Image: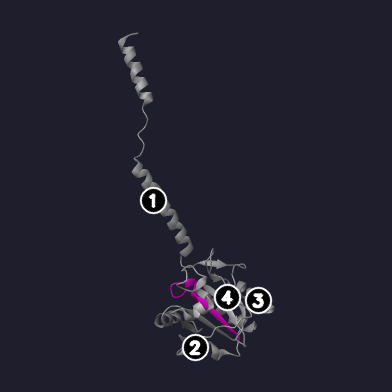
């Protein structure tokens, strides 16, 4: 075998044993960590994009106090002026709507759409609707004005009423804010209906009005 032939064989053998250089371990670890962050960010965004979940079917929980139990009383500053005392509404059927607050636009869309169909709620025997949230009164007054709403919205900055109803247990903000809860308090002060739509896993912050009306109708019939 000639010298040139041996050299060609040696060169070919050397090339076949070489392996492509892999990425440094630090880059691999960093890439995996970045991927994990991106996945978590996507999950967080999907769960918190302005509270835009929508309930079409019966997707709610029923917290306590619930139907048949006394409705805790409260007196809170109202966008309608002064304060509103739930006890002063005794003798009326009242729909309480606990919601997340100024930054939850679907919550305000909910209130607006309920007002548009107020006759249907009156047809179910609802005399008065009141919304409650944890934002300060000036911010609520501005939001109510911007949205052109007439429903009294009550400011509960210390979550005193919200905690009494455990309405801050059904939302995407943990216990620091209300979720999306509806309660009907009867003329006798007893709760006749409750639906907490804002809890995990859907974090629903808007319920289509026909769905809400259907749920109310069924619930009030059983009360």
At numbered mark 1, what does the secondary structure look like: helix, strand or loop?
helix
**Mark number, residue 174:** none
Cα–Cα span, label 4 and label 1:
42 Å
Tell me where residue 120 appears, x and y as whole percent: 62, 80
Which residue is under mark 1? Answer: 34
Task: State the extent of the magenta-drawn residues as a range.
Answer: 93-108
Cα–Cα span, label 4 and label 2:
22 Å
**Mark number, residue 219:** 3
Inspect the magenta stretch and tell me whether residue 107 lies in it.
yes
Cα–Cα span, label 1 and label 3:
48 Å
Which residue is under mark 2? Answer: 84
Q: Quadrant of the C terminus?
A: bottom right
- Report the residue that reaches farthest toward the left: 3
Cα–Cα span, label 3 and label 4:
15 Å
Tell me where residue 32 appears, x and y as whole percent: 40, 47
Inspect the magenta stretch and tell me whether residue 133 lies in it.
no
Residue at image location 45% in from the left, 90% down from the top: 82
């Amino acid at each position: 075998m000639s010298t040139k032939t041996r050299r060609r064989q040696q060169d070919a053998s050397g090339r076949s044993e070489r392996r492509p250089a892999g990425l440094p371990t630090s880059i691999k670890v960093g890439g995996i960590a970045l991927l994990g962050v991106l996945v978590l960010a996507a999950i967080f965004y999907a769960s918190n994009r302005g509270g835009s979940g929508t309930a079409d079917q019966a997707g709610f929980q029923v917290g306590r106090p619930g139907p048949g139990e006394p409705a805790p009383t409260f007196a809170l500053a109202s966008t309608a002026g002064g304060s509103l005392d739930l006890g002063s509404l005794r003798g009326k059927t009242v729909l309480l709507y606990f919601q997340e607050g100024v930054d939850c636009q679907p919550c305000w869309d909910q209130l607006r759409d309920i007002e548009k169909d107020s006759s249907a709620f009156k047809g179910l025997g609802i005399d008065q609707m009141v919304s409650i949230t944890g934002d300060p009164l000036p911010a609520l007054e501005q939001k109510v004005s911007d949205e052109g709403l007439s429903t009294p919205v009550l400011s509960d900055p210390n979550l005193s009423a919200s905690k009494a109803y455990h309405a801050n247990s059904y939302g995407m903000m943990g216990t620091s804010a209300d979720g999306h809860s509806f309660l009907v308090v009867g003329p006798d002060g007893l709760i006749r209906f409750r639906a907490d739509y804002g809890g995990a896993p859907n974090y629903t912050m808007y319920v289509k009005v026909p769905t809400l009306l259907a749920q109310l109708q069924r619930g009030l019939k059983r009360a």
